Structure formats: C-alpha cells, structure tokens
Image (spheres, grey):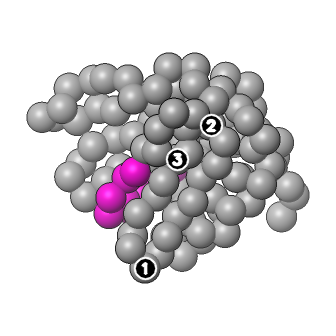
C-alpha cells in the first residue's frame, strides 16, 4: 500500500487517466463527516467514469444510475500498489470524506 497525496494541479490528468483505464469497475463509495456520520453513497455499484473540472471545482463520479458530485474538493489521497489503483479519498471544503474503494484494482498506465 502506498498512500499518496496528489497536488491539485495534477487532479485533472489523474482522473482522466484513471477514467480511461477504468472500463467498468465496481466500487463502494463511503461518506464520513462529523455532522454527516457514516453512510454509503454506493455499494458495489459500477463506476463508468470520473472527471475533475477545474473551472467549476467539481469532481464527478459517474456511477451506474447516479452522478456523485463532490463540490470544492480540497485534498486527494490515492492508494496505489505499483501501477494499480485500489482506492482514493477526497476531502471536500465541508470536511466530508468521500472514500472510493474498488472491488478490484484499476491498472493505471505507467507514467
């Protein structure tokens, strides 16, 4: 496990590359926060794409049947094993943690 924080200027390229490598992977999306508590936004649902838009400062996860939008994300930590992405966590401006865990790792292109 190699947990790494990515600089915000790298997010667009990271999510574009990961989205291209994704195919259709199953994910669990957990939300945690002081006021929110813990809850699942998606449980073993198919993730078909991800996009970070710098202008609007929104990260969108395209999950079968819904779009999970993270407004004003502040930090991004990715968990990689070599070139495989196993999970990532985004903390938004309200302090809510959006934890995305892949059922099977996503093989990323070598950089």
Is residue 54 magenta-colored? no
On the image, the x and y values in percent for residue 81 come to 75, 38
Kindly identify the residue that appears in the image at 71 percent across and 32 percent down. 25
Q: Earlier in the sequence, mark 1 or mark 3?
A: 1
Query: In the rendering, at what x and y percent does residue 43 appear?
Result: 50, 20
- Seen as rendered, the residue at the extreme front is 65
Disc sitting over residue 61 in the figure: 3
Left or right of residue 65: residue 49: right
Q: Which mark is residue 55?
A: 1
Residue under numbered circle 2: 47
Q: Are marks 2 and 1 in contact (CB under 8 Å)?
A: no
Q: Where's residue 105, x and y in %?
A: 74, 32
Counting other residues with Cα less than 10 Å from the Cα at mark 3, is it few (<14), some (14-19), or many (20 or more)?
many
**Circle 1: is it few (<14), some (14-19), or many (20+) Cα within 10 Å?**
few
- Alpha-carbon span between mark 1 and mark 3: 17 Å
Task: First in sequence, mark 3 or 2: give its number.
Answer: 2
SS at mark 3 in the image: strand
Answer above or below: position of 18 versus 38. Answer: below
Q: Earlier in the sequence, mark 2 or mark 1?
A: 2
> Do the residues under discs 3 and 2 have CB atoms within 8 angstroms?
yes
Magenta stretch?
69-77
Q: How far across and how far down the image is residue 108, in percent?
A: 80, 49
Give the structural element (helix, strand or loop) at label 1. loop
**Quadrant of the rendered image containing residue 48:** top right
User: Which residue corresponds to the image point at 39% horizontal and 70% vertical from the top-left?
Assistant: 57
The residues tagged by marks 3 and 2 sit, at their Cα atoms, a distance apart of 7 Å
């Amino acid at each position: 496990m190699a947990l790494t924080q990515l600089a915000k200027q790298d997010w667009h390229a990271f999510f574009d590359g990961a989205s291209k490598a994704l195919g259709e992977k199953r994910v669990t999306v957990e939300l945690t926060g002081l006021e929110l508590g813990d809850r699942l936004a998606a449980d073993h649902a198919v993730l078909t794409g991800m996009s970070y838009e710098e202008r609007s400062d929104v990260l969108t996860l395209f999950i079968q049947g819904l779009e999970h939008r993270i407004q004003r994300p502040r930090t991004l930590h990715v968990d990689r094993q070599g070139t495989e992405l196993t999970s990532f966590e985004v903390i938004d401006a309200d302090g809510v943690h959006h934890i995305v865990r892949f059922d099977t790792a996503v093989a990323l292109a070598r950089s």
